Structures are given as structure tokens and as C-alpha cells.
Image (cartoon, rainbow, N blue to C red):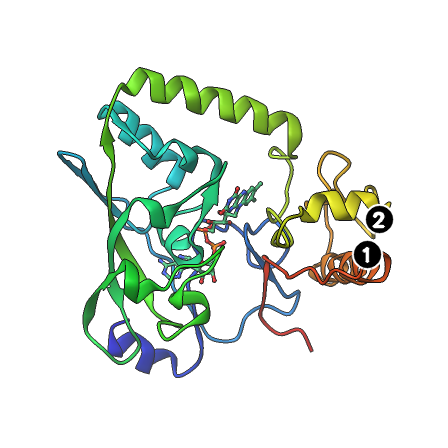
Amino acid sequence: MPNEVREASGSPTRTPGSSRSHARLDSLRQLIADGGVEGLVVRVVNRDYEVDGTRVRAGAGLKMMRLARIAADANLRGFEFAIGVPGTVGGAVYQNAGCWGHELREVLVEARGFQPGADRRTWSVEDLQFGYRTSALRDGPLRGSLVIEMTIKLDRGDGEEAKRLMAKLTSERNETQPIKTKNCGSVFMNPPGDSAGRLIQAAGLKGAREGNAVISQLHGNFIVNEGGATAVEVAALIERARATVMHRFGIELEREVELVGKWE
Ligand SMILES: Cc1cc2nc3c(=O)[nH]c(=O)nc-3n(C[C@H](O)[C@H](O)[C@H](O)COP(=O)(O)OP(=O)(O)OC[C@H]3O[C@@H](n4cnc5c(N)ncnc54)[C@H](O)[C@@H]3O)c2cc1C
């Protein structure tokens, strides 16, 4: 991040991707406190892209779904999974986004951005220390850094076939997840060898409610804002699901959604 930005803020910096609201559950992967966020919020709007052979350079503000279509239009294969990631390139690098058994790290060549107190940097896959829904940007030495673009390497293939696969995956997903509702995506990470949604359903929590926040009837790992739900209500439901699954099955669910802002 440029020093002047950090110095101007003098306080913690957040980087929202495509989240539309920072007051309630309309946000994607972050649950923003009802009291808001103290500090500077930076929104990256760089949506440039460039296809060079099998390599694609994409700005951090570009939507992953859009990039999946760009890749197919260029007759490239290997990025179809991104049609299931409703966020930006920056957010996807931050959390090693993935879907249908594939993750960004499989195709990423490098990412570029700003590290607090340093000039522009290029980070290799090793630097980014990817793990399941995490990276060095989220949980490691690059915390607080700002991604401005990434380069991926794909395979040559039939773009029409890629589009057919994406359409099939999208329609399957629409049947199993509440995609068209206001929700914050998967609430918990899947524990090894199991699925958070299955555990929450088995604990009898589908339909559980706190105010206008409800555990989806379609998929137990989603909390839907039926309209006007507060962040406190959503957080209470998350905690209830975590505690109930722990009590019933002895499995500790780890939150995938981040709580951001002033919670006290
Ligand atoms: C219905 C639904 C289904 C979902 N399904 C999946 C799925 O199958 N697989 C999956 O991986 N994810 C899934 N998600 C989560 C989604 O991928 C994330 O919400 C998205 O990748 C986060 O990107 P964003 O651009 O919206 O970032 P935000 O939600 O705004 O931010 C998320 C985090 O990324 C950081 N960040 C964002 N941009 C940058 C940047 N340029 N530089 C540094 N840090 C940045 C933010 O600071 C924040 O900590 C789903 C979400 C929803 C709502």
C-alpha cells in the first residue's frame, strides 16, 4: 500500500472487494459490525485485463465470474471453477478462492500489490502461502497488503465446452445454495472429511432464526438476511450454530466469514 495512503489514515486499513454495504449482511464475505468500521476503507476498482497466449493478467477489481467468461471467450480452459466465486480477483487472492474442488492457487502465477510501508511488490505462489481459503495476506506475513492485480496461466481448449461446463455448474449451484438471497456466503470452513452444511443440518439448525437472520433451508452453511437483519443477529446465529455443532458432534467449526469493525 502506498505510504501516503497509510499515513493519511493513521489507522487500520480494510480492503473490500465487491461488498456493497458495510453496515449489514448485504456484504459478501465480511460481516461488518452495526457500529461500522474505524479506519480507512480502500476499494480497488482496477478491472483491466490482458490475455497473452495462455496467460491472463487481471486487475484486482475484476469479478472472478467475469474473468471466467473472458477466459472461455479466449478459448482457455482451467478457470471454469471461478464462475462459482462471487467476488473480485483481489478477494479471491486474499482467500485462495475455490469451488468444485479447484482453487485459485492451481492456476496463479503471481500477484502484485502494495505491502504496508513498502513499494509495489510481486508475490510468487510461495510468497502467498496459500491454504484452504487462506493466504499470507489473510493469516501470514503479508497481512494488511493490497492486491492490485494477478497473473494466471491456463490451458488452451474449447471455449464453448468451457461455457457449457460453467452453465451446468451454475444451474447445479442454484438448486443447492441460496445464491439469489442476501447472504454472506459459506459461514464456516468445511472441517476435514466433513461438510459444515451437513453438520449444521444434522444438528437440526436449518430454519433457526435470530431476528431477520435465518439459517437457509436450502443449505445449512448459509445465513440469509430476510431484510433488515443486524450484524449482531447474524453473529449470534453463527455462534449458536458453532456451539450446537460442538455440543452435538464434538467438532469445532471454524468461521470462514470475517467479523469486521467495532463489535464492542
Ligand atoms: C452466495 C455466495 C457463495 C460463495 N461461494 C464461494 C465459494 O464457493 N468459494 C469461495 O472461495 N468463496 C465463496 N464465496 C465467498 C466469495 O468468494 C468471497 O466473498 C469473495 O471471494 C471475496 O471477494 P470480495 O471481492 O467480495 O471481497 P470482500 O468480501 O469485500 O472482502 C473479503 C476479504 O478480502 C480482502 N480483500 C478484498 N480485496 C482485496 C484486495 N484487492 N487486496 C487485499 N485484500 C483484499 C478484504 O479486505 C476482506 O478481508 C461465496 C460468497 C457468496 C455470497
Q: Which mark is residue 260?
A: none
Q: Are marks 1 and 2 in contact (CB under 8 Å)?
A: yes
Disc 2 under 8 Å from ligand 1? The reply is no
Q: Position of residue 246 (x, y in %)?
A: 79, 62
Q: Position of residue 70 (x, y in %)?
A: 28, 30
Question: CA separation, marks 1 and 2?
Answer: 8 Å
Residue at left offset 13%, top offset 34% = 53
User: Can residue 33 be seen in this snapshot?
Assistant: yes
Q: Quick one: quadrant of the N terminus?
A: bottom left
Q: Position of residue 126 (x, y in %)?
A: 29, 63
Q: Quick one: quadrant of the C terminus?
A: bottom right
User: Quick check: 223 left or right of 45?
Assistant: right
Residue at left offset 76%, top offset 63% = 239
User: Can residue 225 be seen in this snapshot?
Assistant: no
Q: Which of the marked residues, 1 or 2, is nearer the chain's N terminus? A: 2
Identify whether 97 is placed above or below 180. below
Residue at left offset 32%, top offset 36% = 67
| Mark 1 residue element | helix
User: Quick check: 65 left or right of 3?
Assistant: right
Q: Residue furthest front?
A: 193
Q: How many marks?
A: 2
User: Within 10 Å of the Cα at label 1, are there few (<14), some (14-19), or many (20+) other Cα atoms?
Assistant: few
User: Within 10 Å of the Cα at label 2, are there few (<14), some (14-19), or many (20+) other Cα atoms?
Assistant: some
Q: Nearer the viewer, residue 161 or 215?
A: 161
Q: Nearer the viewer, residue 81 or 174?
A: 81
- Residue tagged 2: 203
Q: Residue furthest left?
A: 52
Q: Which mark is residue 249?
A: 1
Q: Position of residue 241 (x, y in %)?
A: 78, 56
Amino acid type for the residue under numbered disc 1: Phe
Q: Say which quarter of the image contains residue 56.
A: top left
